[in-house]
Structure formats: C-alpha cells, structure tokens
Amino acid sequence: MSTSFAERTQGRFDDLKVVEFARLTGGETVVEVGAGTGNFLQLFGGVAARLIAVDLTPGMLFEARRRFPEMEQVVADGARLPFGSRAVELVATAQALHHIWEPLPILKEMRRVMREDGRVLIVDQVATERYEEAVVMNQLEIVRDPSHASSRPASALRTLLRVAGLHIVSEHIVEKWERLSNWMWPGEFPEERIDQVKRFIDTHGPKTGMDFHRDGDDYVFKRRRIMLLASRATP
Ligand SMILES: C[S@@+](CC[C@H](N)C(=O)[O-])C[C@H]1O[C@@H](n2cnc3c(N)ncnc32)[C@H](O)[C@@H]1O
C-alpha cells in the first residue's frame, strides 16, 4: 500500500520549484510533518543539510527510509513535535492537512519549532471558494478515501495560518489536469470503490468545482494546490 502510494504520487511536486519558493539557501534543516513516503521532502535533498520526515504512520516512514536513506524518520503526531522551540529553519507539510480534521494545533506546533527567522511551508489541495462546491468535492473525496477530512478553500487556509500566529509572505496557486485513472490506481484502490467514485462523478461531478469531463472510460479533472510560505507574525 505504502509502495503503491509512493509510486502513484511520485513526481507530483517536481514542477513546484519548492526550494526557490521556500527561499532555502543551503545548509538548513527541513522538517516535514506528514512526510509519508518522502516524495515531497526529497525535493530539498542536496540543498538542506538535514531532512527530517515526521509521520504518524510507521509503514509510510518505512517506505521513505527504503527510498531515501539519507532522510531521518520520526514517528510522531504533528500536534506534538519532538523538537525544541525555535530550532528548525523550515517546517513544511504537503498534502497532509486535508487528512486532518483539526489543523490548528499542528500549525501552532509548526510555528513553535520554527526558528525566529524560520519559515513554515504549506502545500495542499484546495476547494473552490464556493461553499456548495467545497461540500460536494469533500463528499467525493470521502467516497474515494475514507481517511480524507477536508479540502479547504484557499481563504480558509489563509485564515488558519493567521489564527496560528503566522504571517503569509508568499502564495502561489498551481492548477494541473489530472486523470481519475492516476488518482485511483487499480492496484491500490478496490474496483468497487473506483466504480462508486465514477458513479458519483457522473451524478455530481459538475457540482464539485473540479471541472470533470469524460475522456473515454476515464475522467479528467483540475487539481488546484496552494503553496503558502509564512513567517512568525509576532515574536
Ligand atoms: C497523503 S499523505 C502525504 C504524504 C507526503 N507528504 C506526500 O505528499 O507524498 C498524508 C500523510 O500524513 C500523515 N498524517 C496524518 N495525520 C498526521 C498527524 N496528525 N501527524 C503526522 N502525520 C500525519 C499520514 O500518515 C500520511 O502519511
């Protein structure tokens, strides 16, 4: 399962230019909360001095270690990071907040461990700003993956960062066309679940704000991701 996830999601961040966006100059420590199999964190390899993958799921970190032996791994909850305060230059999280119902304690904890002059980097998929579309998009995501919590509109993520005591210094929204056949690999997802998602798209797809359209047996849709770089709002 972790291997399939790693293979399916490989390369999905490669064109985001995260090193430049995060303003790394070299020699920093980068911690990723919810690092999974390490596909995002590895992008900082060769620039950062230390890469520390934090995740709740040991199986995901096991796969990260197999693929990227240079990474350090820590099994921990992002809401209770086993690091000292003001210790880390860059504290990141990618594609994890939408699995988390209560992101505020995690964002506050990321702020706690980041250095005085450090940065927090958030990458996550977003819903549109239309409430009704966000609701239907999340219904679809839960049919696909019951561990999904909430894809939030960009405005909700900005508000959460502000409430966590963070000041957004840079923001970028990236749109990319994706295929259902790649979003739900047959080996990774049961066939009945794929059929269920197809039926959902046929009935409710136009209400998700994800711009679904059919392409033969497959479906194409727009994936929107936000990148937010933040500093400490107050000392
Ligand atoms: C969709 S995966 C993303 C993995 C990786 N960041 C990537 O994009 O390839 C989400 C990860 O977040 C982890 N996770 C969920 N809740 C967490 C928490 N409270 N603390 C730490 N990790 C968490 C899950 O175990 C999972 O590995």
Image (cartoon, rainbow, N blue to C red):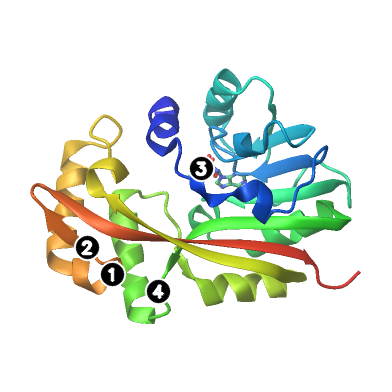
What residue did someone put label 3 on?
14
Front-lying residue, 74 or 91: 91
Q: Residue at x 82, y 53 (%)?
A: 114
Real-space CA distance between mark 2 and mark 1, rounded to the nearest whole angstrom:
8 Å
The residues bearing labels 4 and 1 have C-alpha atoms spaced at a distance of: 8 Å
Which of the 4 image quadrants contains residue 107? bottom right
- Type of amino acid under label 4: Thr
Sequence order check: which comes first, mark 4 or mark 1? 4
- In the figure, is residue 197 to the left or right of 157? left
Where, by quadrant of the figure, is residue 73 drawn?
top right
Mark 3 beta carbon near ligand 1 (under 8 Å): no
Q: Which residue is mark 2?
A: 212
Q: Are marks 1 and 3 in contact (CB under 8 Å)?
A: no
User: Disc 2 residue type?
Assistant: Phe
Dot 4: within a 10 Å radius of its alpha carbon, few (fewer than 14), some, or many (20 or more) residues? some
Task: Please identify the quadrant where the C terminus is shown.
Answer: bottom right
Tag 2 and tag 1, C-beta contact below 8 Å: yes
Q: Nearer the viewer, mark 1 or mark 3?
A: 3
